[in-house]
Image (tube, helix red, strand yellow):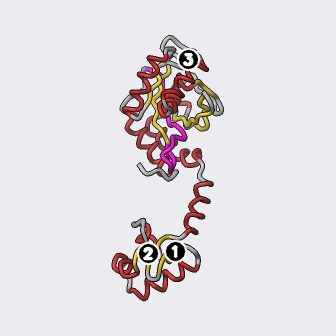
Amino acid sequence: MFTLIDVLASREEAISLKEISEKSGLHPSTAHRILNDLATGRFVDRSQPGSYRLGMRLLELGNLVKGRLNVRDAALGPMRELHQHIQQPVNLSMRQGDEIIYVERAYSERSGMQVVRAIGGRAPLHLTSVGKLFLAADDPLRTRAYAARTGLQGNTKNSITSLEVLERELSRVRQYGQANDNEELEIGVRCIAAGIYDDQDKLVAGLSISAPSSRLDDAWMSKLKQTAKEISVTLGHKP
């Protein structure tokens, strides 16, 4: 049964019983019997006599699974693994209006971080690595509207407070698929971030590593991207 479903999933159009039998290695009578049972449960549709395709029941079940997926639940395990590897805080953040909100964190006292933003904490998009990912995903008009609303207020001498500089920064974010915070939110703290995407290729969250400026290793980026990709796949994203 699982083999037959995989065969049907490999093609967008309906497939004949003969081809299904050949691809699955099942005798036509065996394939026919199982397909009939699947059709009774609406897992398979008979588009015309002798041809089959996946049924609407699978879509219904898929939507149930999707609705129960939670970014935090999908991310927590991979975040902890990444933290164990680098021994620095790993943050999960999501956009809420003109700010990012920290929804989960994996860290320990050994990280050496003097300032750790609490879960539920907020920060302006343009001052954070994850926030820049979300701004980079916007079109230029929305970015300019954000700049007008917020005035691009800074927190430190490194903060980006110019629209022209921000647009150049966002262009680099789009080019490389990653973002950085170079002591722009807090002096002495740097961050790097990668995006988490859902099954519609929509940016839904960002994963970031925070570390004292002298300790952050840019070589962690490849592992961070891989972890973000792993979480995205769990959410149904197809890279």
Q: Is residue 56 visible?
A: yes
Q: CB atoms at circles 1 and 2 under 8 Å apart? A: yes
How dense is the environment of label 3, judged by Cα within 10 Å: few (below 14), some, or many (20 and up)?
A: some
Q: Secondary structure at mark 3?
A: loop
Rendered position, 166 above or below 37 = above
Asked whether residue 198 is drawn in magenta, I would say yes
118 vs 210, left or right, is right
Mark 2: amino acid: Leu
- Residue segment shown in magenta: 197-213
How dense is the environment of label 2, judged by Cα within 10 Å: few (below 14), some, or many (20 and up)?
A: many
Residue bearing the label numbered 1: 44
Residue bearing the label numbered 2: 4
Mark 1: amino acid: Val
Rendered position, 1 above or below 92 = below
Earlier residue among tags 1 and 2: 2
Earlier residue among tags 1 and 3: 1
Residue 53: image x %, image y %? 47, 72
